[in-house]
Image (cartoon, grey):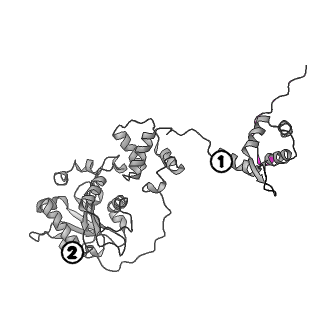
Amino acid sequence: MKNAEKTPKYKTIKWEDRLKIEALYRAGVSVQEIARQLGFHHSSIYRELKRGKTKKRNTDWTETEIYSPNLAQTRAEEKQKNKGRPLKIGNDYPYVKYVEYKIGEEKYSPAAVLELIKKEDLKFDTTVCLSTLYNYIRQGVFLNLTMGDCPFHKEKPKQKKKKIQKRVSAGTSIEQRPAYIEERQEAGHWEMDTVVGGQGKSKKSYLVLTERKTRFEIIEVLNEHTAAEVVRTLDKLERRYTEKGFREIFRTITVDNGTEFADFEGMERSRRNKKKRTALYYCHAYRSTERASNENNNRFLRRWHPKGECLDEVTRGETKWIENWMNSYPRKLFDYQSACDRIRAEPLAEYLL
């Protein structure tokens, strides 16, 4: 009795094989014979012919079914690229909806969303790590999210031109600021900046103050981008918190050299008795790292008002909503506690919360 013919071991069909399959198939060779000649199982050849099946239009406008090695190769490569473990997300639509809403509508980062799920003990069928969540967003698993919706995703750094300071600081240099403030051990030391709208579009701007230790944020609307309007807004804060409260809250304020901060004396003195209400310090020109907390918080604000947007329609209600959103945002820096969580442990909470 003859030994049964052994079935060829499985092997991948390569480009060279596809060219041979095309030639044999066009010559009318049977599938079984093609498989025998090339050393494949006949079912592999059937699948391959199906993979590369297409129609060719003849000169008489009739159509003939043919095998295209190019089409088969493209489809095989696509299938190989999409191979891998099944998505952990599966059909967990509540999870998809929650993630899309938090990132797309409430401007949370993927990391903050995952921590919020843990913190609030939300129950979903899906549990993924941060890198997997980012990969799903890149791959288009979330139909309503792209990497453009994710704040702080890496971009190609722009080449910056070296700038030269055009004028001297209006007041006391940051070099004279007490060294202990740099350690962030005491609350009450603030960084102040403005966030402007599109050039030539906005008369209004934002005055933003960031507490260095807790990253607590205060945002006020400036009706004009002027030094007088900045002083008027600080006077308004003094009325809100009282003269004594202002001195305790704002022990020091560090600013840049923008023209809106030119009135050094007006910002330092109290509106009531003209005594000193805070100590003001000016950064070195074009040294944003000396107000790093302020700059970072400005990026949070820009999630809601991107650069170039007109700010003339902003309302105080909207501004205070964004302020509360920022102060309630879970921060990786604080093991995902918020600025509100941190300020509660400080004496300033009496005035600010």
Q: Is residue 4 above or below residue 141?
A: above
Name the residue nearer the viewer: 300 or 244. 300
Q: Earlier in the sequence, mark 1 or mark 2?
A: 1
Instruction: Residue type at mark 2: give it.
Output: Ala
State the SS at label 1: helix
Q: In the rendered view, does 156 fall on the left or right side of 330?
A: right
The residue carrying mark 1 is 78
Q: Quadrant of residue 269?
A: bottom left
Which amino acid does the dot numbered 1 rest on?
Answer: Glu
The one nearer the camera, 197 or 192, is 197
Image coords of residue 82 (percent x, y): 61, 45
> Residue 228's mark?
2
Answer above or below: position of 230 versus 57.
below
Q: Does residue 122 appear to the left or right of 147 in the view shown? A: left
Please provide percent x and percent y for residue 261: 26, 73
Instruction: Please tell me whether mark 2 sits on a helix, a strand or a loop.
Output: helix
Name which residue lies at 29% across and 73% down: 203
- Name the residue rendered at 70%, 50% in the picture: 74
**Magenta region:** 1-16
Q: Is residue 72 visible?
A: yes
Image quadrant holding the N terminus, namely: top right
Q: Main secondary structure of the magenta part?
A: loop
